Amino acid sequence: MPKITFIDAAGTAHAVEAEVGSTVMEGAIKNGVPGIEAECGGACACATCHVYVDEAWLERTGEPVAMEQDMLDFAFDVRSNSRLSCQIKVTDELDGLVVNIPEQQG
């Protein structure tokens, strides 16, 4: 299973394994990663799974689609590498992915 590293706002790394076909958010929730609230359960209806994708991984995670962009308007401190982790599908190519969790969720 691909490994994903979540770095929380305090700088603590939380490395988890996520199933291929799931989402980055699901990997965080199943492994108890703090800071990912996921209030809508992955329906892209809130901004409580907001992450910053490490610059080295931007191409592999892709661009947010229009619906995700709209939801990011509700997130705090949106940056050019902001994504909703519920919208990033886990693939073998994402093994080693690093994302940062903002101090505050939407």
Image: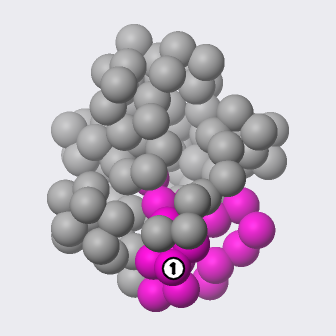
Q: Residue at x 49, y 22 (%)?
A: 91
Is 75 magenta? The answer is yes
Q: Is residue 39 left or right of residue 6?
A: left
Q: Position of residue 31 (x, y in %)?
A: 25, 37
* Amino acid residing under circle 1: Asp
Q: Position of residue 54 (x, y in %)?
A: 71, 47
- In the picture, residue 81 is in which quadrant? bottom right
Q: Is residue 24 left or right of residue 80?
A: left
**Residue 70 seen from this side:** yes
- In the picture, residue 45 is in which quadrant? bottom left
Which residue is denoted by mark 1 in the rendering?
70
Q: Is residue 43 left or right of residue 88?
A: left
> Quadrant where the N terminus lies?
top left
Q: How many marks?
A: 1
> Quadrant where the C terminus lies?
bottom left
Q: Residue at x 19, y 59 (%)?
A: 41
Start and end of the magenta stretch? Answer: 68-85
* Residue at disc 1, secondary structure: helix
- In the picture, residue 34 is in which quadrant? bottom left
- Front position in the image: 35 or 73: 73
Residue 63 lies, with reference to residue 104, above or below; the image says above
* Disc 1: CA contacts within 10 A as few (<14), some (14-19) or many (>=20): some
Q: Position of residue 64 (x, y in %)?
A: 60, 58
**Colour scheme used in the picture?**
one colour
Q: Position of residue 23 (x, y in %)?
A: 37, 39
Is 71 magenta? The answer is yes
Residue 49 lies, with reference to residue 21, above or below; the image says below
